[in-house]
Image: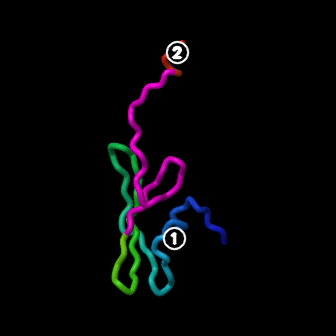
Amino acid sequence: MDIPENSLHWAVDKWLAPSPAHPARVVRLCRSPVTGMRFVCIEAWHAGGVIAILFFRHDDGSWNVFPPQVRRPSMSAARLAA
């Protein structure tokens, strides 16, 4: 089965490499009340102990280990030229 490269499943497989012996599990689901940013904490057991990683949802639908850029107010000449 092909897993899209922007899915959470794909990101977890890439970063945590879960297996039947060391499955991954969702520890926490969050959504920021201020920015609406969504993120998930997922952990997996490995030989060295537990590894937990935060995955952040981006506007394009992808999940990454870094948060999306904050939208800042901006002006452009195109909007002012009329």
Range of magenta residues: 53-77
At numbered mark 2, what does the secondary structure look like: helix, strand or loop? loop
User: For mark 2, does the 10 Å Cα neighbourhood hold few (<14), some (14 to 19), or many (20 or more) residues?
Assistant: few
Q: Does the magenta stretch mainly form a helix, a strand or a loop?
A: loop
According to the picture, the residue beneath numbered tag 1 turns out to be 14
Q: Nearer the viewer, residue 19 or 47?
A: 47
Residue 8: image location, x then y, percent: 51, 63
Residue type marked 1: Lys
Earlier residue among tags 2 and 1: 1
Q: Residue at x 43, y 61 (%)?
A: 65
Say which of marks 2 and 1 sits in front: 2
Residue type marked 2: Ala
Distance from disc 2 to disc 1, alpha carbons, whole Å, reads 47 Å
Residue 50: image location, x then y, percent: 34, 79
- Report the disc number at residue 81: 2
Q: Residue at x 36, y 75 (%)?
A: 51
Please tell me whether residue 23 is drawn above or below residue 52 in the rendered image: below
Residue 54: image location, x then y, percent: 38, 63
Residue 27: image location, x then y, percent: 36, 69
**Residue that lies at the very extreme toward the right in this rendered image:** 1
Q: Is residue 78 magenta?
A: no
Q: Are marks 2 and 1 in contact (CB under 8 Å)?
A: no
Q: Is residue 66 magenta?
A: yes
- Count of numbered circles on the image: 2
Please tell me whether residue 60 is drawn above or below residue 78 in the rendered image: below
